[in-house]
Image (spheres, grey):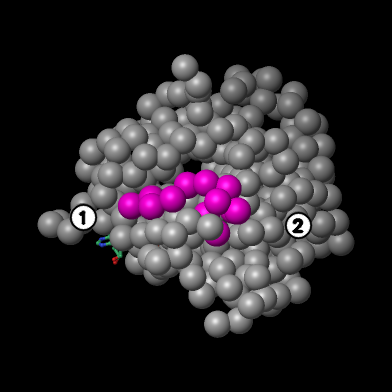
């Protein structure tokens, strides 16, 4: 049997009497980049909350590398190798770029080692932190407080913090929100670069970005995944066109409305 990097089995979530996630099945292979698209309110962020442990499912299963994680706490899931970033930036404003990243690195070392081994690994942590700074292109901002970075730099730092712990599965919820076209394209290549070899799930609205980034696209409409396939297949899927994509796909292909 194949072990997937991330697997959702008949996942459901209700708030009160309202069914928000209505039986989602999804199996993501290790190293795949998946874009999650769908109208506002479809349940994309809720899906991420269920996967990352912020919300408990009403029923169904979530498996990370073959292990059930539904019902676990967010930090437990994080330590099992899944890391997410938020629509709202979650970096420490009064710590420098270096310090923010090193927090993330130390967090991942902290539980693996006894205190003495932990101390002897500080050099490793510092080295890994410097490497992260290079990866996200903030060498010149190494000692600048996070609050004094530009918006795009803060988002880059947040990606750095998200991957700092070495997670194998990364969830990004609308990472390019609020960015200009130029910032977006720069940022997407950064995301591609730093997630090489990792499994990536990202919620994204910009269809140009989606088709450029994703190996596969999951289309979420009204709490269900109505399609999960390659960009070409999703583009050609009649049900998707009908339910959601039509005009957006035309936009991405430059055909206008
Ligand atoms: N904690 C909550 N309590 C009640 N309703 C919620 C909660 N979180 C989300 N919802 C509802 O679930 C639906 C899906 O929301 P969300 O997952 O944020 O959608 P998306 O990210 O696709 O825009 C929305 O109708 C939203 O109002
Ligand atoms: Mg959302």
Magenta span has 232?
A: yes
- For label 1, the SS is strand
Magenta span has 109?
A: no
Q: Nearer the viewer, residue 104 or 244?
A: 244
Q: Nearer the viewer, residue 179 or 26?
A: 26
Most extreme residue toward the top is 1
Residue shown at 40%/59% (left/top)? 239
Residue 20, relative to residue 197: is it above or below? below
Question: For mark 2, what is the residue?
Answer: 189
Instruction: Estimate the x, y position of residue 77 in percent, counting from the top left.
Output: 45, 35
Residue 156 lies in what quarter of the image?
bottom right
Instruction: Estimate the x, y position of residue 49 in percent, counting from the top left.
Output: 39, 50
Tag shown at residue 19 = 1
Describe residue 189's horizontal placement relative to residue 235 as left or right.
right
Which sits earlier in the primary sequence, circle 2 or circle 1?
Answer: 1
- For label 2, the SS is helix
């Amino acid at each position: 049997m194949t072990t997937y990097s991330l697997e959702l089995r008949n996942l459901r979530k209700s708030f009160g009497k309202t069914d928000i996630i209505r039986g989602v099945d999804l199996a993501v292979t290790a190293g795949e980049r998946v874009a999650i698209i769908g109208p506002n309110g479809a349940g994309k962020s809720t899906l991420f909350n269920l996967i990352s442990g912020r919300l408990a499912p009403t029923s169904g299963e979530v498996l990370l590398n073959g292990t059930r994680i539904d019902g676990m706490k967010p930090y437990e899931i994080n330590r099992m190798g899944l890391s997410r970033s938020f629509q709202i930036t979650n970096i420490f404003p009064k710590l420098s770029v270096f310090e923010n990243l090193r927090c993330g690195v130390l967090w991942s070392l902290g539980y693996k080692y006894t205190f003495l081994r932990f101390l002897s690994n500080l050099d490793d942590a510092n080295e890994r932190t410097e490497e992260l700074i290079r990866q996200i292109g903030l060498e010149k901002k190494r000692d600048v407080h996070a609050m004094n970075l530009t918006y795009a730099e803060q988002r880059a730092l947040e990606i750095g913090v998200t991957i700092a712990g070495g997670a194998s599965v990364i969830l990004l919820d609308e990472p390019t929100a609020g960015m200009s076209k130029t910032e977006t394209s720069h940022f997407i290549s950064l995301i591609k670069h730093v997630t090489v070899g990792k499994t990536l799930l990202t919620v994204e609205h910009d269809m140009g970005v989606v088709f450029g980034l994703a190996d596969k696209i999951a289309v979420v409409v009204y709490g269900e995944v109505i399609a999960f396939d390659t960009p070409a297949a999703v583009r050609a899927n009649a049900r998707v066109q009908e339910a959601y994509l039509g005009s957006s796909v035309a936009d991405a292909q430059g055909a206008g409305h």
